[in-house]
Amino acid sequence: MKTPQLIYGKRLTGEEKLYNFFAMLGGITVFIIEYFKYFFIPPYEIEETKKHMADFGMKTLPIVSTMGIIIGFVMALQSYFVLEPLGATDFIPGSLGISILREFAPILTALLFAGRVSSGIGAELGSMRVTEQIDAMEVSGINPFKFLVIPRVTASTLILPLLTVYVIFVSLFGGYLATFLQEQMNITYYFNSMISYIDMNDVLQGMIKTFFFGFMVGIVGSYKGFTTEGGTVGVGLSTTSAVVTSSLLIIFIDMIMVKLGMM
């Protein structure tokens, strides 16, 4: 027997779940509109944005570093087992480089980033909401959206592409380690062979999507935090929901871009 879904201690019917889903999509859309509405209006919270960029980057760096080198190593090793019987191991650097640049580094980095950052934003803003700190800011004449949301969303949009570039290099190095262990391939030959297969279009196609991913992570985390209710239980639910929603939207955006031929 399935356990009924509970939100703030209340069982939801199918109609209520559907309503909440579309309400969430509408709320996220409003947040996106509000972001672009206030983004160009001074004052600009540049220092806050820098602080959040450093914070988001440091939170995510250890896990994406580990993921990057393992992904590169495993992909190169699996490619070797497939191509070695065909005598085509020279194609490993090129195929590895294209796969990592176009898809694996951007999407996997974004998903890990969502797990660390979107949850953090949701928990932080959710705690401020339930403890009425956001309400206090509004009473004081401070625009909480401008001060709390804009810097976080901007920071996540800008830092994710930088993390992705880092993961690309780490993954390619992990791939080299695997090819060296199997083929004793020279590092100069490895990278020269890879570069001969990669063009600027591959780089751009992999990087452009990371701005959309980072933006969505910041927006979803902020939305979930801002709309938190139900005390500490609500904060926990908002945090979990922020991770799940942002991860699903990342995959959906990537699928749409690939389908449309943009990526």
Image (cartoon, rainbow, N blue to C red):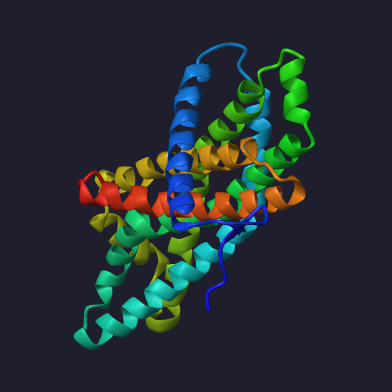
Seen in the picture, residue 46 relative to 85 is either above or below; the reply is: above
Seen in the picture, residue 79 relative to 152 is either above or below; the reply is: below
Residue 164 visible at all: yes
Foreground residue, 5 or 28?
A: 5
Residue at 32% x, 84% y: name it: 81
Residue 83 placement: quadrant: bottom left
Foreground residue, 189 or 178?
A: 178
Left or right relative to 155: residue 236: right
Measured as percent of width and height from the top left, residue 174 is found at 48, 68
Foreground residue, 254 or 54?
A: 254
Left or right relative to 72: residue 148: right
Residue at 42% x, 43% y: name it: 22
Measured as percent of width and height from the top left, residue 134 is found at 72, 28
Residue 110 visible at all: no
For this orientation, the residue located farthest to the bottom is 85
Residue 183 placement: quadrant: bottom left
Measured as percent of width and height from the top left, residue 229 is found at 68, 42
Left or right relative to 129: residue 225: left
Left or right relative to 45: residue 214: left
Residue at 47% x, 36% y: name it: 28
Seen in the picture, residue 73 relative to 142 is either above or below; the reply is: below
Foreground residue, 181 or 239?
A: 239
Residue at 58% x, 11% y: name it: 42
Count numbered badges in the picture.
Answer: 0
